[in-house]
Amino acid sequence: PYPAYAEFRRTTPVAQVDPGGLWAVSRYEDVLHIFKNPKLYSSEGLRLAADPPWFGRSNPISDSLIFMDDPKVHGRMRGLVNRAFGPSALSRLEPSIRATAEQLTTRVLDRRDVDFVADFALPLPASVIGALLGLDPALHSRFKQWADDIMAISATQPGDTAMLEQCRRTVAEMEQYLGQVLEHRRQTPGDDMVSDLLRSRVDGEALTAKELLGFLFLLLIAGLETTVHLLGHSARILAEHPAVLRQLRGDRSLIPRFIEEVLRFEPPVHGTIRLCTQDVTLAGVSLPRGSPLLVLQGSALRDEHYCADADRFSLERKGPQNLAFGHGMHFCLGAALARVEARVALEALLARCGTVSLRPEPVEWNFAMTVRGMRNLPLEVLP
Ligand code: HEM
């Protein structure tokens, strides 16, 4: 349970949580209202945070679709990238996801005592993103650091010389590798996502070089850690609920339902940030123009008005829409891919693992306002 969220929902559904002015929004209906009204609650205003003046060079991610408000501009960009994430692209990827999940299952069973994050939950999505981006597998182990550095830029201050330098190096390195991939695919197009993006046209228009690079940066940030946490939470919940593990082993068709409930119960993204574009009143609270909001999906999904007995993990739910992937124009582009990754991972694990239990070593959680998950997960896994 998340008692602080429950208290917020009950007493102050729009609460000022830091003196700098950040407001936490915790009820389901208000979270949904914000996602449905990008005109009032902006993502574009956050572009500056992703690329502060003291960074001293441009961060390609600030040109990506996650920071676009104008439905026309955003819609054009989504139109150009959507197909690369559609059903045929996913069926093209599924066999290689399965092969990797099976290899990792063998590794987990061989080791028996594992850190599930390092041994399974991280390498699977890293290999998927690597394949999507067309990067050399030797680079996969660098992705986590790359993603951490890009995320860290928005938290820097002008005096953080060493950190800023590290982030600049990472941006330069990513630009170099991704630039090479783009050039290679321009010369030799293939049956892969980058080639699809290069071919993509809406009303005869292609993506610009800047948009392409920004989009590839975004995929690495948006698609890696989130999926790592979905897999980590799934494994932990199985270890904590042996009856659910037995139920899923007996009937694999329950796996998609299990994944939806994991996404509701422990969403990898607990909060997203928006800025008010004008003075607004939300749940009776006046918010001046420019106010930053922490939109707490993690709380909304535990809201009793949205789902009864919300603090209980249950496979019986047929609840309304899941906000774990957001809602509206910025609804996660990779939602179907993340669901395929989780389903294939669980199919591979459940086919061969009979017992999954938590080992006594401590679990370390990450420290972030928006993405929540474990840095390690010590498990014992037996056939
Ligand atoms: C957007 C969650 C996996 C790519 C989002 C948003 C959420 C989210 C909440 C909306 C952000 C906002 O409204 O500001 C998740 C979760 C994942 C996941 C929980 C895994 C369980 C992925 C994957 C990819 C991806 C695998 C791609 C490889 C994107 C992109 C956007 C996005 C490109 C921006 C869409 C837009 O602005 O139009 N994701 N995501 N995500 N996600 Fe995911």
Image (spheres, helix red, strand yellow):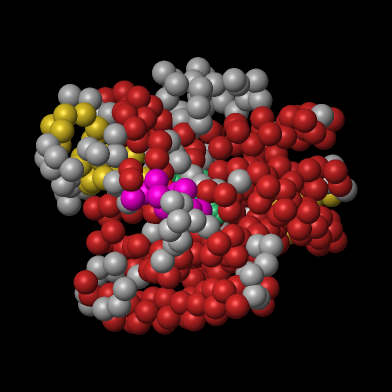
Q: Is 179 included in the stretch rendered in magenta?
A: no
Instruction: Indicate the position of residue 312 as horizontal and vertical percent values.
Output: 56, 25
Q: Is 79 included in the stretch rendered in magenta?
A: yes
Give the left or right position of residue 377, taking residue 62 as reference: right
Q: In this view, does 18 lie above or below 193?
A: above
Give the left or right position of residue 3, taking residue 313 as reference: left
Q: Residue at x 35, y 77 (%)?
A: 163
Q: Residue at x 39, y 69 (%)?
A: 210
Give the left or right position of residue 142, taking residue 360 as reference: left
Give the left or right position of residue 290, taking residue 58 as reference: left
> Can residue 244 be seen?
yes
Q: Is the magenta stretch mostly helix, strand or loop?
A: helix
Q: Residue furthest front?
A: 204
Q: Residue at x 80, y 57 (%)?
A: 99
Q: Is residue 74 above or below residue 143?
A: above
Q: Which residue is drawn at 43% across and 58% down?
A: 205
Q: In which quarter of the image is residue 335?
A: top right
Image: magenta residue range: 73-81
Instruction: Indicate the position of residue 148 as horizontal and vertical percent values.
Output: 46, 66
159 or 28, which lies in front?
28
> Can residue 371 be seen?
no
Instruction: Indicate the position of residue 94 as horizontal and vertical percent values.
Output: 74, 51
